[in-house]
Image (tube, grey):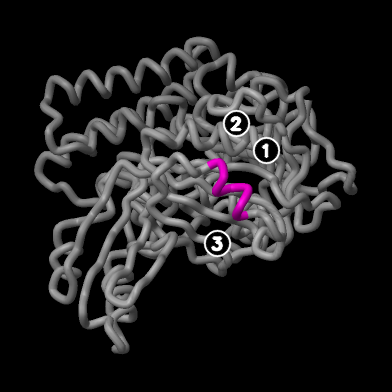
Amino acid sequence: MSPVSHDIRPELVVAKFGGTSVADYASMSRCADIVLANPATRLVVVSASSGVTNLLVELTQANVNDERRLALLKQIAQIQYAILDELGRPQDVAASIDKILSRMSVLSESLELDRSKAIMDELLSTGEQCSSILFSAVIREKGTASDHFDVRQVLRTDSHFGRAEPHIEAIASLSGDLLKPLLANYVIVTQGFIGADQDGRTTTLGRGGSDYSAALLAEALCATAVEIWTDVAGIYTTDPRLAPNARPIAEISFNEAAEMATFGAKVLHPATILPAVRQKIQVFVGSSKAPEMGGTWIRHQVEDTPVFRAVALRRDQTLLNLHSLQMLHAQGFLAETFATLARHKISVDLITTSEVNVSLTLDKTGSDSSGQGLLSEPLLQELSQHCRVRVEDNLALIAIIGNRIASTAGICSRVFKVLENHNVRMICQGASPHNLCVLVSESEAAQVVNALHQNLFES
């Protein structure tokens, strides 16, 4: 069952299915039924089958020996062949899968001699290539014309392998010329997470980039809705595993959803919201395993705007402390620091300053597709040339998301009452009316989230 909002029925829907939704034949068949239930759904974006990307990432590691490499390739092939067997092994589909698996093997061998990120990106893209071919075959099996489409023909990016940036105008132009004409006669299945630079070399958008791909294509095609199908029935007031009384949210605004995605809501990739905001494309988040349960609509404007909407948690945070007497009554220190971070493609989340100290939070989930970390040795050496650097790990960022937080009296006292027995490493509030953020120890994060949820949503 496909969701229908109370708005006019969308003319073009882009549906994205995550790894668990396309994990095996039964899952793909269930998702194909969701697609076919809504005639407006003409473009489907898929992730690699569950577990495949992690296996491919392991293949890119320098310490993988030949025996382990062959075992990983066999494991990936078994996932694809299990789906092929359920389809009855159609000759054309099997030939396409075999071709990709062969290329996968060649690329993994190539990394022994050339550990370039360009080769890694092409290797990592093979999971989505396989799942798109198989999902298209499942739709055809159900009697609907469908074909797979190589997204690298239209999703143009720069050459920053591992975490490429899209070229919005080029994507719109190419999608209009090459992709849109196909949608009239076929349900097209394409790949999330991957693109290509101007020389045709495969790039990736970073881990979790399939949501972003779907939104970019929706923007390029002027779609009226993007459906993100995952393994949970929408967005909740917090992670139900941390707070048993967490409840689903029927409708939230783009601003609230962007804050939630940025600060840890696993349902959405943070960048997903950006193309949707630009074109006011509504986004639906629902469960492919239980579509009848409905989900969450994300819209430009919503009727209900409560002070407290949700509590988000983002683990694995790093606090970067910079100390320098050059800051004292001087100009330029922050400019030089941010210029250094920019050169190393580091995005800063939160910042607090004193006369001689700056503290910055960095999100390790912003690592590139290969899983390589943010704080490289060259970066730390460059920063150390003009300040003393101290790095703290094992921290978690908790964000209280809502509306009018900066202008509502009593918010801070209510929150700090919950935090009085916990060591808070950083507090940020005021830059946005939609959030209040605190940085705490990783070991205390779950307890703090549950306590905040009880106080703000259950009492």
Give residue 86's mark.
none
Residue under label 2: 230
- The span shown in magenta is 412-418
Mark 3 vs mark 2, CA separation in Å: 31 Å
Q: Closer to the N terminus: mark 1 or mark 2? A: 2
Mark 3 vs mark 1, CA separation in Å: 28 Å
Q: Is residue 203 left or right of residue 259?
A: left
Q: Amino acid at mark 1?
A: Val
Q: Closer to the N terminus: mark 3 or mark 1? A: 1
Under circle 3, the secondary element is: strand
Residue under label 1: 285
Q: Is residue 78 magenta?
A: no
Query: Taking 168 as reference, is 260 above or below it?
Result: above
Please tell me which residue lies in front, 62 or 392. 392
**Residue at coordinates 40% horizontally, 66% vertically from top-left?**
352
Query: Taking 134 as reference, is 216 above or below it?
Result: below
Q: Amino acid at mark 2?
A: Thr
Quadrant of the image for the C terminus?
Answer: top right
Cβ atoms under marks 1 and 2 closer than 8 Å: yes
Q: Is residue 135 visible?
A: yes
Question: Residue 327 placed where, x, y %?
Answer: 27, 81
